[in-house]
Amino acid sequence: AKRLFTFRRGAADRTADASEALGLKGSNLALLASLDLPVPPGFTISTSAWREAATSGALPAPLRNELLASIEWLEGVTGRIFDGAERPLLLAVRTSARSVMPGLADTVLDVGLNNRTVERLARELGDLGFAFRSYRRFIESYCSLVHSLDPGEFDDVADAERTRAGWEGIEPRSLVDWRALISAYLSFVEDELGAAMPQTPLEQLYHVVEASFASWRTPVARAFRMVHGVAENAGLAVTVHAMIFNERGENSGTGRAISRDLKSGQAVLTGEFSLGGRGTGEVIGQRAEPLDLATVARDGLAFPADLEALANHVRRVEAHMGDVCEIDFMVGDGELFLLQSRIAKRNVAEGIRVAVEMVRENLITEEDALLRIEPSSLDQLLHPTIERGEEILVIGRGMPASPGAASGQIVFTSEQAIALAAEGRKSILVRNETLPEDVHGMHVTEGVLTVRGGTTSHAAVVARGIGKPCVTGAGLLRVNAEAGTLVALGRVLHAGDWLTIDGSTGDVISGSPKLRRPSLTGDFATLMEYADRARRMRVRTNAETPAEARAARAFGAEGIGLCRTEHMFFEGERISMMREMILARDEAGRRAALDRLLPIQRSDFVELFEIMAGLPVTIRLLDPPLHEFLPKGEQEIAETAVMLGISVAVVTERIEALQEFNPMLGHRGCRLAISHPEIVEMQARAIFEAAIEAGEKKGKAVVPEIMVPLVGLRKELDFVKARVDEVAELVAAERGQSFTYLVGTMIELPRAIVRADTIAEVADFFSFGTNDLTQTVYGISRDDAANFLSTYERQGIIERDPFQSLDIDGVGELIALGVEKARRTRPDISLGVCGEHGGDPASIAFFEQTGLDYVSCSPYRVPIARLAAAQAAI
Ligand code: PEP
Ligand code: MG
């Protein structure tokens, strides 16, 4: 089999499956050559040759023979001769792996220079300095690669020579001095290595290729492959091509061209170009400012090559790759050469701009455009980010629990946050962990930082819901709320000091660096339209407050998939009515308190129905254990006692009675509804009355969806549904009006999955509560998971936090089972998911496969879910 593959403008030996055999650079040069673009002629030694050489140690004879033949070919193509008496052929040798990899040999230039050819080259070009400068560099890089000699050691040789010969500056001027310098270099090499550096070009080439091959095994390259899962035998190709004299003053240089203006998306040449490179002895090292290619083209500035041709070449490559491309090019004596092309890097906004523009130009399809944008990257557009290039002082790190950057003055309690907000000042709420009663403070603060908790902790869930940046589990910080201090990295910050958190990265930053505001441009909206056309699954939102619901609508939510009613009970005086209900002596007392909560809930629901304007709204009955609503700490307990006119002893006694060891598995969800049906009755009534009211206002019936949490037994659902149905009949009779509604359940217990077929007989819809489901399937408490799951990730026991990205093999398998069972008894059942996973792209791909009807996620994740659902459907 062939070991070497040649390329020249218009012809390449091999282009099919080329990257495996020729590596990135080699296959790319072959591609450019086959597109009839100007590349320097050359050849690539394939990875299979590398494999042969790796087993035999030195270059095997057949490979040497092929090398020899290819050099002859190259001599024919270039009209230059290796070691020739005139016009010597010089080569550039580059390693070419299948992916970019550190640790591999650097490019060696000017292979083929020796004591003879250097002077021939000098004569040919009429440029003594250039020829010798190249030779000097070649000796250094050859010895560095082949013999691991430190190039810095040559400085001493040069110093000695300078003193001896009496020239000044960086390099000699005269032929005599240059010869002496080179001779000193070569003697030094011989002394160091005990053997002379080869003068025969072919021998030089063999050694450079051998050393390039061997660089595959440097520790850096090995470590990189291990970390990135690149196979040890993937192998290395080596590309050899004729030198381009791109470093010879005015008519030469090096540049990078891009096929489009990434800001505007327009197909105009951009990029930059540096004239001359190394230049003459006087200006070595001082590179002139690179020229901006767009400016050169616009203003018709001088350029050493055919700029129009360059623009055409770049367009050609773009058309071939179907994406914006970036090209490394060189100009040697006015002649243009392309060295490498790749897809141009861009930020999210640029990526969307370019993709939309290319769809407009009919270059790619809407599907292509959708697949080019990483869904989670949209986050950067929806939230403020820290201005790049800012000096920042990171003083801690936690979990990126709710994206976006925010700055404010440190506050340690919700009350302080509210006080600051009242004065129009910005705060960051810093807590060990947040509690339900902190919701109010969270609404008015800029961002939330907690020392404890993970990405599904209370703080995280609430913050995501209301779109506030949040960092949780910043375990190295010490918060002392009473002393009003935050200690980080030995630095003490006080209440009122400025602090910034980045909820996209988890960084905690001292001070207030400049933030960049989000901008939802027209392109963003266009991309979302593409997504909506491509996706099958619907996207709803998890929202309770009007602000969340409105934000979600603006982001394109198609309804509410989860309204957690408990979040509506914390604000203002609602919490005291709730406490009154919980602390009541008997059912009559509870009903009295519930009667006062009813109109409040009703008007909340009316507002949600109105904002959602006919879109489905799923309202979940009360879920958390009741003790979460009770006062904490002596002072609050005393205040509650006074307010409700009962003794502190009674309050304390009730708090103790309601205390649970494991509230996650305790008296919550439908279990509450079964022990306190009056709560269900109140909530159902509020929902129905609100639906009628909102329906009348809009002139269009609202069909509410009532969702029962934490069902494990069909009889639980039977029980709660019976109460709901009774209330519906009552309300219908009172209003003399019939209406439709749905009753469904959350599926968040393994038992509910196993019995999904029978539960589906009584449920209009299922919504998989993947937060609780993950918790109950794993037997891992959501709130305590962060403490050890990061260790699991480090140890490679799990790949990702299953509370962030669905555990497809375990929890996913169960969901698929539940779907299958549910559809068996009720083929038209509506199936959704409302856990955090509803906003996670990898999980969304799985939900699409599983055939769910919709996902529901926090408002700010709605665009991400729309794009991810589209990608999953393509
Ligand atoms: C769930 O368990 O997935 C869910 C959405 O409910 P919550 O997070 O409120 O328990
Ligand atoms: Mg749940």
Image (spheres, rainbow, N blue to C red):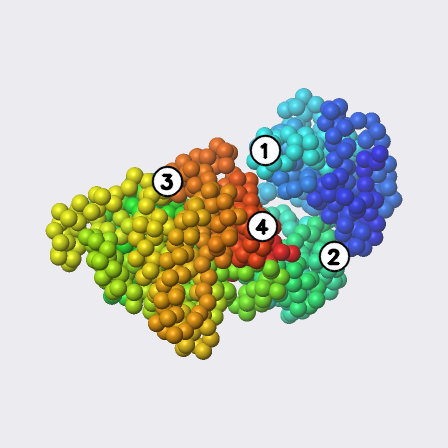
- Amino acid carrying mark 2 in the image: His
Measure the alpha-carbon separation of dots 3 and 4. Answer: 37 Å
Query: Mark 2 highlights which residue?
Result: 320
Q: Earlier in the sequence, mark 2 or mark 3?
A: 2
**Where does residue 486 sit, x and y in percent of width and height?**
27, 46
Measure the alpha-carbon separation of dots 1 and 3. Answer: 32 Å
Query: Mark 1 highlights which residue?
Result: 226
Judging depth in this view, the residue of 223 and 829 nearest the camera is: 829
Q: Is residue 589 above or below residue 693?
A: above
**Where does residue 142 sit, x and y in percent of width and height?**
68, 34
> Do the numbered discs 4 and 2 sit on residues whose CB atoms are within 8 Å?
no
Other residues around mark 4 within 10 Å, as few (<14) / some (14–19) / many (≥20):
some
Measure the alpha-carbon separation of dots 4 and 2. Answer: 49 Å
- Amino acid carrying mark 1 in the image: Met
- Residue 397 in view (yes/no): no
**Where does residue 275 sit, x and y in percent of width and height?**
65, 56
